[in-house]
Image (cartoon, rainbow, N blue to C red):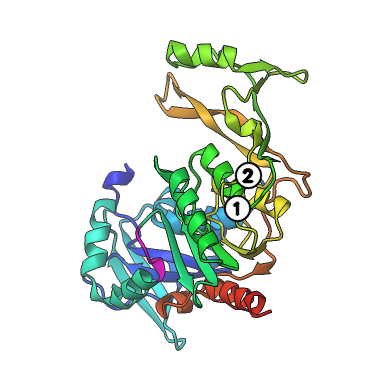
């Protein structure tokens, strides 16, 4: 039904309890512009809408930052599912000088959004600024500043066949350039391959380390699994019984539970990590392990994924007989090799700094600028 539904036609972001417009996805409305605050939609106040959606969005542990990022990404769909399925919207907004206005707009199909957004000229300033902030389109990108004494490494996802070899080559380059400080940007990184996370952590230590403490399964032959025969064989041969019940994965099945070697060219300088509510899954495992193993400084928001681990990896797909609803059951319980503090929490920042709509419109990255300032203080000593 969502594919054919006329949804709320604006992209949004949260600033505290405020709902801010990031893009206008209508084909012809030029009244509501990026940077404006949405005060109400169809008579419902923005704080009420935010609260109703957040309490219905699943999150990791007790973390709110991840839920807020998910609300931003899926606001139109969530509004339709949980608030109002009207195809038209009366939107009350406030502009940057506080002037209020009420506008009636029609909903848009999800398939129309990108075309509308690109064609609507009110989005031009935001799109220009976003292109400036997004930088390289590569999954892994490195840039130098200040005569190469400082570098910025951005990783969008733990994905790609050449991931590990790319890391090795970049860290060799950092060594050759005698870089003193590195800003690691994991904002919006939703995870990926487990082993790639361990490979990144290895680049910041010159000693062997543990990445996962254990990977646990409740069953290695669940009745609902429709895996290939070899998967059942691999689980039988690659696990051992857990004295507390269930099974533990052996290093022969998943190298992440074994001892990890240090990187070929480990970076031992000052490290500053940028993270937010979109730092999830493997990316959250990385931030948690780096916080344990290094003296890295963390900037931004609490990671969207818990520091202690997650449930993901191997999964089984089942279809419920009556509703025919498809469900994916994740089988691996990952436990990071950490001495845990508060359970159900992510990696906490040393400097909390949220993104604001005004910064985006100006093409200004406050988290990066703070990290750069701190890095310069270190390299000048």
Circle on res. 262: 2
Task: Locate residue 245, reporting x and y percent.
Answer: 73, 18
Task: Locate residue 37, reporting x and y percent.
Answer: 45, 75
User: Looking at the image, is 364 positioned above or below residue 242?
Assistant: below
Residue 38 falls in image quadrant: bottom left
Residue placed most toward the observer, 20 or 293: 293
Verify whether residue 69 appears in magenta.
no
In what quadrant of the picture does the C terminus appear? bottom right
Residue located 68% across and 58% down the image: 348
Residue 116 falls in image quadrant: bottom left
User: Looking at the image, is 237 positioned above or below residue 334?
Assistant: above
Residue placed most toward the observer, 217 or 370: 370
Q: Are the residues at dot 2 and dot 1 in contact (C-beta closer than 8 Å)? A: yes
Task: Locate residue 359, reporting x and y percent.
Answer: 47, 77
The answer for how far apart the CA atoms under marks 2 and 1 are is: 7 Å
Residue located 59% across and 17% down the image: 238
For the record, the magenta segment spans 133-137
């Amino acid at each position: 039904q969502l594919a054919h539904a006329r949804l709320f036609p604006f992209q949004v972001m949260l600033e505290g309890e405020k709902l801010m417009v990031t893009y206008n996805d209508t084909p012809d409305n030029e009244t509501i512009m990026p940077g404006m605050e949405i005060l109400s939609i169809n008579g419902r106040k923005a704080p009420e809408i935010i609260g109703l959606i957040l309490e219905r969005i699943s999150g990791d542990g007790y973390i709110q930052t991840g839920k807020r990022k998910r609300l931003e990404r899926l606001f139109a769909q969530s509004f339709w599912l949980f608030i109002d399925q009207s195809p038209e919207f009366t939107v009350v907004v406030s502009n940057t000088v506080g002037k209020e206005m009420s506008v009636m707009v029609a909903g848009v199909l999800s398939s129309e959004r990108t075309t509308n957004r690109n064609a609507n000229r009110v989005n031009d300033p935001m799109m220009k600024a976003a292109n400036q902030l997004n930088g390289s389109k590569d999954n892994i990108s490195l840039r130098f500043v200040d005569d190469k004494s400082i570098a910025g490494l951005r990783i969008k996802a733990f994905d790609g066949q050449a991931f590990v070899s790319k890391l090795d080559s970049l860290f060799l380059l950092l060594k050759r350039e005698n870089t003193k400080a590195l800003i690691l940007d994991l904002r919006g990184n939703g995870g990926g391959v487990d082993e790639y996370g361990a490979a990144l952590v290895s680049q910041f230590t010159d000693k062997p380390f543990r990445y996962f403490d254990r990977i646990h399964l409740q069953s290695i032959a669940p009745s609902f699994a429709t895996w290939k025969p070899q998967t059942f064989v691999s689980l039988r041969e690659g696990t051992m019984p857990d004295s507390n019940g269930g099974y533990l994965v052996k290093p022969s099945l998943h190298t992440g539970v074994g001892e990890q070697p240090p990187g070929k060219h480990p970076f031992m300088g000052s490290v500053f990590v940028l993270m937010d509510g979109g730092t999830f899954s493997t990316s959250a495992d990385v931030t948690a392990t780096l916080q344990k193993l290094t003296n890295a400084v963390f900037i931004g928001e609490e990671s969207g994924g818990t520091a202690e681990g997650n449930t993901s990896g191997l999964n089984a797909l089942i279809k419920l007989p009556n509703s025919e609803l498809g469900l994916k059951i994740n089988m691996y319980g990952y436990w990071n090799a950490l001495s845990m503090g508060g359970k159900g929490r992510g990696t906490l920042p040393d400097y909390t700094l949220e993104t604001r709509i005004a910064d985006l419109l100006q093409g200004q990255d406050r988290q990066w600028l703070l990290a750069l300032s701190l890095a310069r203080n270190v390299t000048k000593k």
